[in-house]
Image: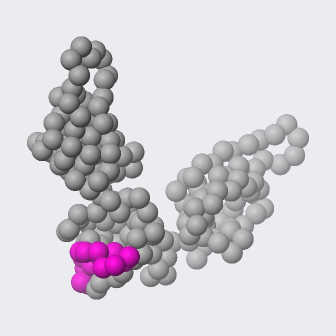
Amino acid sequence: MARISGNDIRPGMAINHDGGLWVAVKTEKVKPGKGPAYNQVELKNLIDGRKLNNRFGTDDRVEEISLEYREFQFLYVEGDKLVFMNNETYEQIELPKEFVGDSAAFLQDGMTVTLRLHQERPISIRLPEQVVLTITEADPVMKGQTAASSYKPARLENGLRILVPPFISAGEKVVVDTTEITYVRRAD
C-alpha cells in the first residue's frame, strides 16, 4: 500500500493507524502562530466503530488502505446469519445479524447491497438509501388536530415504528429513509 504524508489525509480515506483500520471522517488543516502546521483528523475505526481525534504533521507517514466495493444480493435469513450472494461470481457468504445491525430490518429478498471489503474480509455494509414498505397499522386522525406538521405513529411491515403524516392509513405503501428511519413520501 502507499505511504502518504499526514497532511494528505482527506475525508473518506482509509488508513492503517496504530495497527487498526480507520477511515477519516473530518479533516482540518491547522496553521498555528507558533510551531509547524498539522492536519487535525477525526478517525472512525472500521472494525468496532470507535472514534479518535489525531494530529498528523507533514513528517508523519501513514499507510493508505485500498478498500474494495462489491455488489451483493440479499437472499435469506438462516438462524442468526444473513446470506448474501456476490452478483459477479455467484458465491454466497453468511454474515451475522450484528454485522448489519438495526438496518437488518430493512433487508428484503433480492435487495442489492454494497459491501466494503479489505483483503476479501467484509468491513461494512451499505443498504439502499430508501426502501418501499407497507404500513400495517396507523393511528386514526384526531378531529381538530392542526394541519401544521402533526404526525402520527405507524407500524411498518418489518415491525419498525415511524411517524407519518395524518393522511397516511394502514395498507398504503410509503418510502422510508434507511439511515434516519423516517417517512419520506408515499410510494408511487
User: At which x and y percent is residue 89?
Assistant: 26, 84
Tell me where the magenta segment starts and ends, as one range.
75-90
Image position of 181 (left or right of 50): left
The count of marks equals 0
Quadrant in the picture for residue 79: bottom left
Question: Toward the viewer: 103 or 56?
Answer: 103
Q: Quadrant of the C terminus?
A: top left
Q: Is residue 110 above or below residue 129?
A: below
Q: Is residue 110 left or right of residue 177?
A: left
Q: Quadrant of residue 9?
A: bottom right
Where residue 162 appears, x then y in whole percent?
A: 32, 42
Residue 109 appears left or right of 180: left
The one of 90 and 57 positioned closer to us in this rendering: 90
Left-right relation of 99 to 142: right
Which one is nearer the viewer's eye here, 118 or 139?
139
Query: Residue, x 27% and y 40% (percent of image)?
Result: 154
Residue 149 visible from this viewpoint: yes
- Magenta: predominant secondary structure element? strand
- In this picture, is 134 found above or below 127? above
Q: Write the residue at 24% across / 14% down.
A: 144
Q: Nearer the viewer, residue 123 or 40?
A: 123
Residue 37: image location, x then y, percent: 78, 47
Quarter containing the N terminus: bottom right
Residue 147's spot in the image, x, y percent? 25, 17
Residue at x 32%, y 45% (from the top left corner) = 161
Residue drawn 30% across the image and 79% down it: 78
| Res 116 visible | no
Residue 34, placed above or below residue 91: above
Membership of 63 in magenta stretch: no
The coloring applied to the image is one colour
